[in-house]
Image: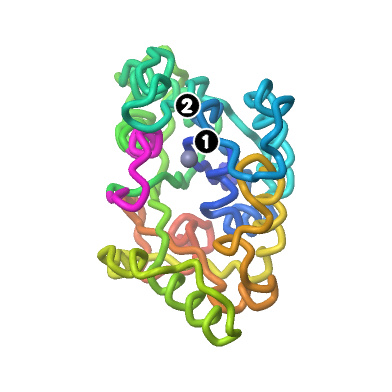
Amino acid sequence: MEDPLCLLTVHAHPDDESSKGAGTVHKYHEQGVHTVLVCCTGGEAGDILNPAMDKPEVRERLHDVRMEELARATELIGYDDVVMLGYRDSGMPDTPENEDPRSFAKGEFDEAVGRLVAVIRRQKPQVIVTYGDDQQGYPHPDHIRVHEITLPAFEAAGDPDAHPDAGPPWQPLKLYYVAWARARIVALHEKFQELGLESPFDERWFERPSQDHRITTRIDVREHDDARRSALLAHATQIDPESPFWFGLPAEVAREAYPYEDYVLARSLVDSDTPEDDLFAGIRVSDRA
Ligand SMILES: [Zn+2]
């Protein structure tokens, strides 16, 4: 018996799973791939970014509210399992949250790697998705930490001598970084202009060096954009439904303007030719026949 296909993504806060790669997960879930989200923190330090939700009764129980939002969003995306790694949101540098020893960024590094190794060994993913090594665009300490722990966890999960208490070894086969393509920004920006709408993409978006030459893998998600949009909206405290950045274009226009999610293949133990259009290229039984 072949092991069933499993895709595991590692994200920092509730809502990151909806803003990065949600269409991809929805697509693989529909194909019968087992999909697992590892959410490293509870997002306690997040601001309420939707004015309509900025009320004392929401503020008081923000942690619980964000957990409820996450449950709804992950159901819409089609995550079969959601695993909380159990850390507190580290907030941005120079905030009190950032000094909290229970925070993800201040917690002991090997301990965090070990927690992720235990999840990988239990869930047995062939493919892991994490954040890239270049996070200049949004240098949140928790996002940087996600990248930093996933690399050693990918290697250690298959090593019987590493974290021996974290279960029997399991070696994932491919590691990807989520990418936010310049080509996406250009395509959406041009659509705003074409329709005579004000584009949320100002010159700062175009000043950052493009990472597009690193993209190896492009997943067609045009059939899965509704799931992505509704999952974003489920994060009512974090995502303003009036946001031009997320919802400025009509849904049917946005879907066709740039119908892909992009990835960088960072580590692979199988043969697959890049560019790819499938995260499981080289892993499926048909590829190896
Ligand atoms: Zn985040």
How many badges with numbers are in the image?
2
Mark 2: is the Cβ under 8 angstroms from ligand 1? no
Tell me, yes or no, whether the two marked residues, 1 and 2, touch with CB atoms within 8 Å: yes
Classify mark 2: residues with Cα within 10 Å, few (<14), some (14-19) or many (20+).
many
Relative to the observer, which residue lies in front, 274 or 106?
Answer: 106
Q: Residue at x 45, y 47 (%)?
A: 129
Distance, label 1 to label 2, CA atoms, is 7 Å
- Residue holding disc 2: 89
Q: Residue at x 62, y 55 (%)?
A: 28
Classify mark 1: residues with Cα within 10 Å, few (<14), some (14-19) or many (20+).
many
Q: From what the image shows, is residue 243 above or below residue 119?
A: below
Q: Decide if residue 144 is on the left or right side of residue 235.
A: left
Q: Residue at x 31, y 35 (%)?
A: 148
Relative to the observer, which residue lies in front, 83 or 121?
Answer: 83
Q: Secondary structure at mark 2?
A: loop
- Residue holding disc 1: 13
The magenta stretch is 134-147
Residue 24 at x, y percent in the picture: 57, 58
Q: Decide if residue 279 is on the left or right side of residue 14.
A: left
Q: Secondary structure at mark 1?
A: loop
Give yes or no for residue 135 being in the magenta stretch: yes
| Image quadrant assignment for residue 70 | top right
Using the rendered image of the protein, determine whether residue 23 is visible from the camera's viewpoint.
yes
Residue 221 at x, y percent in the picture: 60, 67
Using the rendered image of the protein, determine whether residue 1 is visible from the camera's viewpoint.
no
The image's colour scheme reads rainbow
Q: Which mark is residue 116?
A: none
Screen quadrant of the N terminus? top right
Mark 1: is the Cβ under 8 angstroms from ligand 1? yes
Relative to the observer, which residue lies in front, 234 or 269?
Answer: 234
